[in-house]
Amino acid sequence: MEVKLEDLMKAKTGIASADVTPDNLPSAEVMTAQVEKVVNDLNPEERAQVDKIKDELDLTDSTAILRFGAPAQQKIADSVGGQSGEKRRGYQAGI
């Protein structure tokens, strides 16, 4: 099954990505309330992990942010692609 960004955007927002504009996205207040709800639903162990990451991540350092996000992006790519990163890199290299 092929996963397309258009389908994911529509499923998440109810809006096709081609139709996304600042006018039809949730307000900052709504998004803040949604984040607060998710944070409040964390168990103590999850909350401690989030706080540890938050304290270690310097949001003024773009390199640190990229280093933090890269592994998560790779995990998503691997799960969507159905192959491990090593298999994909080997395939691309012709190995």
Image (spheres, rainbow, N blue to C red):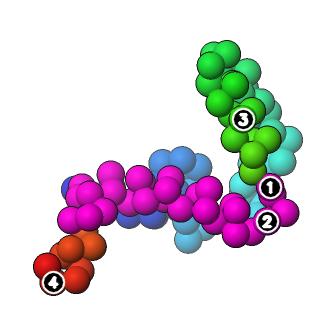
| Most distant residue in the top direction | 44
Q: Give the class, few, some or many, for how many residues have Cα within 10 Å of label 4's Cα (few <14, many ≥20).
A: few
Determine the CA span between mark 3 and mark 4: 41 Å
C-beta proximity under 8 Å, tags 1 and 2? yes
Q: Amino acid at mark 2?
A: Asp
Q: In terms of image quadrants, where is residue 21?
A: bottom right
Location of mark 4 (residue): 94
Q: Give the class, few, some or many, for how many residues have Cα within 10 Å of label 2's Cα (few <14, many ≥20).
A: few
C-beta proximity under 8 Å, tags 3 and 4? no
Magenta stretch, residue numbers = 58-87
Determine the CA span between mark 1 and mark 3: 12 Å
Location of mark 2 (residue): 61
| Of the image marks 3 and 2, the number of the one nearer the N terminus | 3
* Mark 4, secondary structure of its residue: loop
Q: In terms of image quadrants, where is residue 87?
A: bottom left
Determine the CA span between mark 1 and mark 2: 6 Å
Q: Amino acid at mark 1?
A: Asp
User: Left or right: where does residue 27 sit relative to residue 41?
Assistant: right
Q: Quadrant of the C terminus?
A: bottom left
Q: Please, is residue 60 above or below residue 94 in the view?
A: above
Q: Quadrant of the N terminus?
A: bottom left
**Would residue 62 be counted in the magenta stretch?**
yes
| Of the image marks 1 and 4, the number of the one nearer the N terminus | 1
| Disc assigned to residue 58 | 1
Q: Position of residue 11 (x, y in %)?
A: 48, 48
| Of the image marks 1 and 3, the number of the one nearer the N terminus | 3
Answer yes or no: is residue 5 visible.
yes
| Of the image marks 3 and 4, the number of the one nearer the N terminus | 3
Q: Position of residue 39 (x, y in %)?
A: 71, 28
User: Left or right: where does residue 77 sit relative to residue 73?
Assistant: left
